[in-house]
Image (tube, rainbow, N blue to C red):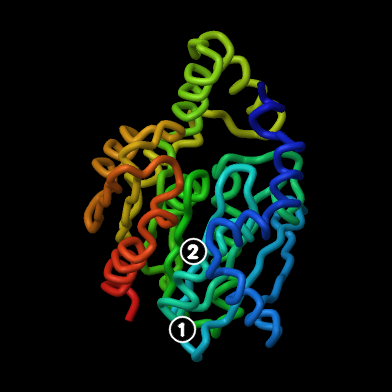
């Protein structure tokens, strides 16, 4: 189960190979945007080494007009930065932000032995936030926006000590904890209860990767978050079930905002409600980043 969950390599490779066709098929407006960025060499990439010696990759794009407004955009499970280009478009093209899109461990062009489900990734994203601040002028105003596992990562980041340039967070359909999400998947996909498999696998994860499923908790992290956060979740989400957003929202101190998206299944709130999603994000982020 540990390999099935944290190192689904065939799935990652097939998604990597298909990323551009998939994105252009689902979001046709991305094709001319990416082409225009490439023509002027505006779509750049960069690598860093984290404190554990793991090489990590990100794409970044400066805003069309010089600005200190910057968004760090975090992808989901078995995905990569290219598969978050629609949110990149939202911030860069619609809102005029600089953007940086990191690839989490073991996904995209980033190294690492396994997917870390946001928990180890929170420390990498904090490092990327500092890098983004350096790239875009050292006095940025920053939002972090993640979807699915990226949403959970965003919440996990939010519970850590923040730099003064970080202003707010947007999380879209992230889970309460890795324990809750894996337990849900175990039941819905395999009809199995948490005991004994979850306990054994969590213990193995601790031995192999240095963290367990219960400590990897977005819920505990948002409770420590002092900065504003917007929560987005589809009301028909069964993959990260909609109920998860309510305890997360409750645990988060003010300021906060919640948008339950009618009819949306997992991670399609933007795709199915592009204008409304853009307007709501613009309004929320605009309150804290001027």
Locate the C terminus by quadrant. bottom left
Q: Nearer the viewer, residue 68 or 85?
A: 85
Q: Which mark is residue 68?
A: 1
Locate the N terminus by quadrant. top right
In the figure, is residue 212 to the left or right of 250?
Answer: right
In the figure, is residue 80 to the left or right of 86?
Answer: right
Q: Residues within 10 Å of mark 2 (few under 14, many from 20)?
A: many
| Location of residue 266 in the rendering, given as x and y in whole percent from the top left corner | 44, 41
| Location of residue 65 in the rendering, given as x and y in whole percent from the top left corner | 49, 90
Q: Which mark is residue 87?
A: 2
Residue in view at x 48 percent, y 21 percent: 183
Residue in view at x 55 percent, y 85 percent: 137
Check disc 2 and report its element: helix, strand or loop. Answer: helix
Residue in view at x 44 percent, y 27 percent: 180
Residue in view at x 45 percent, y 81 percent: 96
Check disc 1 and report its element: helix, strand or loop. Answer: loop
In the figure, is residue 92 to the left or right of 34?
Answer: left
In the figure, is residue 212 to the left or right of 71?
Answer: right
Q: Nearer the viewer, residue 267 or 109?
A: 267
Nearer the observer, disc 1 or disc 2? 2
How far apart are labels 1 and 2 at the CA level? Answer: 18 Å
């Amino acid at each position: 189960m540990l390999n099935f969950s944290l190192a689904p390599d065939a799935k990652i490779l097939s998604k990597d190979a298909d990323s551009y066709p998939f994105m252009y098929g689902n979001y046709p407006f991305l094709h001319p945007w990416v082409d225009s960025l490439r023509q002027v060499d505006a779509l750049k990439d960069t690598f860093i080494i984290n404190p554990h010696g793991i090489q990590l990759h990100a794409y970044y794009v400066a805003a069309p007009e010089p600005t200190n407004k910057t968004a760090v955009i975090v992808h989901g499970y078995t995905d990569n930065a290219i598969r978050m280009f629609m949110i990149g478009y939202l911030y860069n093209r619609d809102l005029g932000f600089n953007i940086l899109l990191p690839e989490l461990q073991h996904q995209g062009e980033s190294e690492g032995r396994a997917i870390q489900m946001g928990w180890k990734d929170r420390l990498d994203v904090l490092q990327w936030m500092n890098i983004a601040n350096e790239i875009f002028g050292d006095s940025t105003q920053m939002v972090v926006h993640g979807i699915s596992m990226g949403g959970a990562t965003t919440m996990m980041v939010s519970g850590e000590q923040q730099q003064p340039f970080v202003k707010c967070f947007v999380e879209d359909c992230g889970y309460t904890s890795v324990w809750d999400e894996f337990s849900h998947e175990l039941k819905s996909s395999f009809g199995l209860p948490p005991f004994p498999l979850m306990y054994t696998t969590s213990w193995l994860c601790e031995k192999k990767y240095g963290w367990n499923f219960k400590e990897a908790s977005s819920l505990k992290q948002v409770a420590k978050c002092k900065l504003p956060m917007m929560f987005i979740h589809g009301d028909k989400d069964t993959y990260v079930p909609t109920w998860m957003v309510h305890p997360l929202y409750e645990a988060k101190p003010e300021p906060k905002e919640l948008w339950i998206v009618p009819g949306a299944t997992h991670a399609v709130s933007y795709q199915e409600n592009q204008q409304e999603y853009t307007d709501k994000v613009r309004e929320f982020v605009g309150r804290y980043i001027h």
